[in-house]
Image (spheres, rainbow, N blue to C red):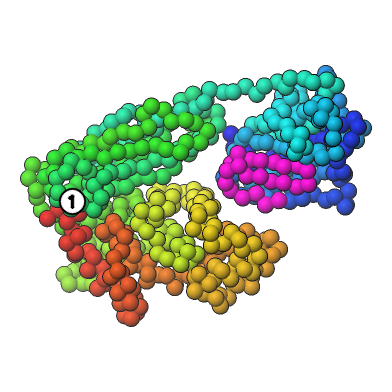
Amino acid sequence: MRISNSETIKAFVASSEYRERFDATPDNPPASVSTNTGTSVNVQSGSVTVTYSSVTSPGNTTITPINPASAGALPDGYALGDYSLAFDITTTATVTPPIDVCFNVPSVTDAARFDRLRVLHGEGGALIDRTSNKNFAAKTVCGRVTSLSPFVLAETSQPITPTPTPTPTPATLQLSQSGYSVGEGGVFLSINVLRSGDTSQPATVSYATSDTSGLNDCSTVTGKASARCDYTTSLGKLTFAAGEQSKTVNVSIVDDSYAEGTETFTFSLSNPTNATLGTSSLATITITDNDQTTGANPLNGVDFFIRQHYLDFLGREPEPAGLQGWRNTLNNCPQGSTACDRIEVSSGFFRSEEFQTRGYFIYRFYSASLGRIPRYNECIPDFAQVMGFLSPEQLEANKVSFIADFMARGEFRNRYDALTDPTAYVDALLQTAGLQNHPSRGTWIAALTNQSMTRAQVLRALVESTEVYQKYYNEAFVVMQYFGYLRRDPDILYLNWIQTLNQNGGDYRTMINGFLNSDEYRKRFGP
């Protein structure tokens, strides 16, 4: 279940002998609290704390004191005192249950009296006791539910056992089988992920391919498939909507020309939310060779050349129109022309709007906020979050999710978490980016001070600024040659390539020619 679009909780506080001062007066106005993405997100105002299991889209939570007269009929044995109080709790964030609502009641010093406090929840027109936790030392009483509707903190006339919340059968996520087989010429393998049990709530699970081939020469026969030579790394997160029971992941296969026999790699599931992993969470994938003897390098072929660029730089299979367009460009290119040859076509993938707004978007977070280039094994999973066939809405949601994840990493937190002052935070970012005189510095400091922007929004604004885009363009162009063509971290020579681009006005042809026709690249696919 996902809750969004300004859903409202009404929370009522009651007691016959005491009350906390939460009157709805001009002196006690509504409190609007920023609600960011993440798990176990706490929103607190005064003596009311709301904890969301997860927030997938940020917004604001507003806690407003109201008249408790509309509390409704209480069950037998419960009562509202003369000084009962109430709250409207409204959120514009998109949240996932369970939701905990806790009330702090420090004026209750009698343990027996405190023990009679209960949190009631409106369900189907009735108020049900959903008290989940009480702590006399901390003076907190909490209730846990799966939907947003009225809450009442009431007092019982005598100890009453709360109605337990039914525990649904947990959902299970697993692969459709423990082993798969695909022919080397099969283009891609479809893997089904199944969900069973309670599917009434949204669920997520991460997936990834892996192998132990490392940087072995692709011509070496080991029985181990390699993501550099035999298949394309596939990883990401699957999101199941309520009621959804299956998802499909396609793993692209590379039809090289080496006679290498049968090879295997693995596909695994991990990190489920709102579900557990079933017995088939790891599968062995077998690629059956279609070459009896080693043949000519398939990279010489137009279609193979184009498809491999889609896989290496855009992280997806080519769409028919795109494949045909590049095919026409290469097949109709006059002999000796530099406007449409393989070097120019290859450069077009890095320079494309798709890569610039996705791959280069991810890249700049490392250089601008961490002061270093990304490493291959950390950047490829990040790229996967924004690559592929995504709608504009999906792309934006994935970008927001990436930024939240990036800012939660230890390296970023160690640099910036202690800098709670807006000026200190912005200046630290600009210092790292090498742009201390950025024209938007004052704007960002003011926006953080008046809370019209969050720290995540300021970070994104910096990364997407023209100044950062231009500063790291040549650096990213070079690093992506290593990531795309060679599928590894750059060696020290990458600094020479950056210097070359900077000195020749960004003329990339010499650089791309070097990578495109290198033995290391060509021998990924054949002799």
Q: Is residue 193 above or below residue 365?
A: above
Q: Is residue 106 magenta?
A: no
Q: Residue at x 42, y 70 (%)?
A: 472
Seen at 30% across and 77% down, the residue is 500
Looking at this rendering, what residue extends furthest in the left direction? 293
The picture places residue 382, in percent across and down from the top left corner, at: 42, 53
State yes or no: residue 50 in magenta.
yes
Query: Is residue 178 toward the left or the right of residue 30 in the image?
Result: left
Q: Which residues are drawn in magenta? A: 33-54
* Pick the front one: 371 or 348: 371
The image position of residue 179, as x and y in percent, is 28, 31
Mark 1 residue crowding within 10 angstroms, few (<14) / some (14–19) / many (20+): many
- Residue at the image point whose x is 83% and y is 51% from the top: 29
Q: Quadrant of residue 51?
A: top right
Position of 104 with respect to 419 (left or right) is right
- Vertical position of residue 373 compared to residue 32: above or below: below
Please state if 316 lies on the left or on the right of 468 as rendered.
left
